[in-house]
Amino acid sequence: MNAVTTPPEAGGGCGAVTAVRGSLVWFGEDPFPTSGEGALEYVEDGLLVCRDGRITAAGEYSDLVEKLPVGATVVHHRDKLILPGFVDPHVHYVQTRIIGAYGDQLLDWLQNSVYPEEARFASRAYAERFAKLFCEQILRNGTTTALVNCATYPVSVDALFEETHRRGMRVAAGKVLMDRNARPDLLDPSPRQGYEESEALIRKWHGVGRSLYAVTPRFAVACTGEMLRLAGKLWHEHPGTLMQTHLAENTDEVEEVRRLFPDRKDYVDVYEHYGLLGRGAVFAHSVHLEKREWKRLSATGSGVAHCPTSNLFLGSGLFSMRDARHRKRPVHTGLGTDVGGGTSLSLLQTMGEAYKVGQLGHVPMDGTKLFYLATLGGAETMGLEGVIGSLAPGHEADFVVLDPSATQLLAARTAESETVDDLLFALATLGDDRAVAATYVGGRVAHERSPCPDPKPRRSSRRRWNRSRNRELRWLKFEEGTGWSKDLEVPGAWSPHGPGIEAYKSLLYCLHQDTAANPFLWWDVYDKETGAWRGDREITDVLGNRVPNHGQPAVSHANDFLYCVHHRDVSDTRLWWSRYNIEGPEPGWSADQVVKEPGGREVRATGASLTVYDGLLYCVLRREDSTLRWLSHDTGTKAWSAESDVPGGFTSSRTPVVERFKDHLYCVHDRGDDQLHWMTYSSVSRSWSGSRRIEDPDGNPVRTSYAPAIARYNDHLYCVFHQEDSGGWGRLWWTRYDEGKGWSRPERVGAAISSAGFDVSAYHGPLFCVHRG
Ligand code: GUN
Ligand code: ZN
């Protein structure tokens, strides 16, 4: 009866107004020339309002909330910081898999580790796989814009842009141009062909959605003069495109460039000679530069990407922030991850390393400067200031929600922070992807952190090797009169999400994803006769196949079957359904199928729930755009109805839950405000009631931090919900609805400490609750 959930995907324009509440932080100007104080914009209780992918207002919550149009959703990010999405002005998606390759320095590392890997990107399927992984990973790290090097092959560019375009991301990328000093299968057959292929890619992708093309000569060691000349020509022929390359990363490389271009003054002069300096040109590394070179970069408006994790990992050298941000000749500077030379896709970790490199050069940067570099600094480096990198109205609505209490250590460190700058600095030194509570692209959620980022010590030693994301499943039961029982383990059952539970034919079924590393559906059964669980095992369907699963499945019996609706994969929002019959004509689990409307359209959701009502199986779901929809299934014909709107036009930040109670279908949901609401549907009048807030007897709202679970039990409708403490842990609470009296005062579900992910069902006497410990 509970929720099936998968992280929401971003989509195209939204039309509707969405607003997020939290502490807003952005940079009005460059903090390097000043003390930094004036550069930082901070609104403690702020509201960021977005429409059609752009920021329309950023300011005090109390001022702006009144001006919101009717139907606007407000998502609350309590005690969290909302900042512009991170900008990574130098990264190689085609090196994702070779991150952390031991031993070599730049030139050998390229030949031994990088080039063999990039050669694999001639395969479209391989490129698609890593484009997807790369996008997932940067979003989970809060990065919304990147300047990306692809491989020589145009398919490697197509694969990336297809993925970033689908997600609505502002990404710049290009195929590397290289015509010497590497294995032949990686080289452009001629400079002319490299030019023509790049030009075809510009025509295909530049300006499509938010995609930008970047002309990408790899570096002077791998490019002949003719290749560099054509790169410069191409860049100038297509205004608005970017240019990216590597510059003075390693001393052997600098030496080699001197040997290859003896007529040029220095490395910067090589690029300048071929017309490659200017606004929108980004030079990665720039570690070993002379004063003249810095001056030329500054005078031409070029940008540099400081890549500290890479420079340390490859032993390249120490970037000079003092030279880059010299008062008299400043150069636009951002922070690049440079994966796979870099060791992390996290700009938080990159800020931490930039600080340490700064310390070695006696330029200790504070939190304000570090975050400026990772946001507006990166945007300026790419020539995209005014478009991204800021929360000021008019900018594109790409932002990140950071949690200063994401881990126990961060929580301890930030508990007594007295300034925003200190909070930012703590996040830069201790933060990583766990500190990213959510990432928004174009005003819509593109990544949401799992609710339990910080593991609690295990109570049991079984399956110790499993990732911290997994939790043991625990159960307890409630009886009127005696209250809640002790909280016990479901022996050997684990899940990185919650279970779906339901009584079916004299047994209580519990379905759940096994561990994060084993993303398949498992089930266990509780038998009232023995008072014990029978043992957790994998589900195999009638064809003998395991059932891939991601997230919390929804289960409900309907007529003679137990139904399960679930997701198969984190990045696949299609819903799948299957059903189980313990005996009868179709015993066992059916093979799962995509939920489809009568016309064949596939139903997509980021969460769904099920219940049987008036002979049909009802499914209420949260679509990718966060609105609620519903459809029904006829167990006889095995057909799904078309999807309809749940009226009200609001969006929800969590999965809604449904249950039949008395003559109605009840739906409990939130409306993006961390509070529980409810509405009912009648199959007689074929209409929904309006959505009302659940209030305790004193009229107080009921707060929630996860999708609730509902079940009817002894003439009441019970609702169990989660209230988060710190680090994703929380308590379960319950309230119940009585037709005469309304909702009861919430009480704790026994002494259970729970992470999010739970379900309830009445089963032979008591009400059962299974939850993630
Ligand atoms: N110089 C030329 N190509 C590369 C590359 O792929 N990575 C790094 N770090 N430096 C380079
Ligand atoms: Zn690089």
Image (cartoon, grey):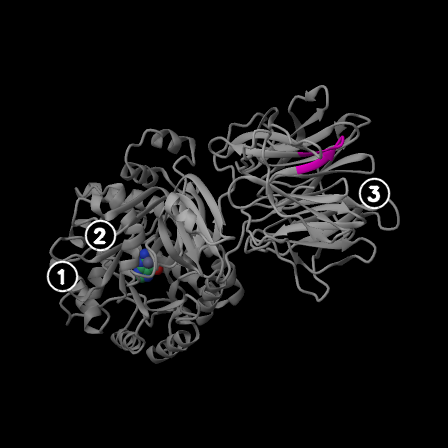
* Kind of residue at disc 2: Asp
Q: Earlier in the sequence, mark 2 or mark 3?
A: 2
Q: Report how far apart the C-alphas of labels 2 and 3 lie in the structure.
A: 67 Å
| Secondary structure that dominates the magenta span | strand
Quadrant of the drawing holding the C terminus: top right
Q: Note whether ligand 1 is within 8 Å of mark 3.
A: no
Taking 116 as reference, is 606 above or below it? Answer: above
Left or right, 16 with respect to 711, comes to left
Residue sitting at x 24%, y 70%: 276
Q: Report how far apart the C-alphas of labels 2 and 1 lie in the structure.
A: 19 Å
Q: Residue furthest top?
A: 482
As drawn, the label of residue 30 is: 2
Q: Earlier in the sequence, mark 2 or mark 1?
A: 2
Quadrant of the drawing holding the N terminus: top right
Q: Report how far apart the C-alphas of labels 3 and 1 lie in the structure.
A: 77 Å
Q: Nearer the viewer, residue 233 or 35?
A: 35
* Kind of residue at disc 3: Ile
Taking the magenta stretch, the answer to whether it contains residue 345 is: no
Sort mark 2 into few (<14), some (14-19) or many (20+) by Cα contacts within 10 Å: many
Left or right, 22 with respect to 354, comes to right
As drawn, the label of residue 318 is: none
Please identify the quarter of the rendering in which residue 490 is found.
top right
Residue 392 makes an appearance in the image? yes
* Kind of residue at disc 1: Lys
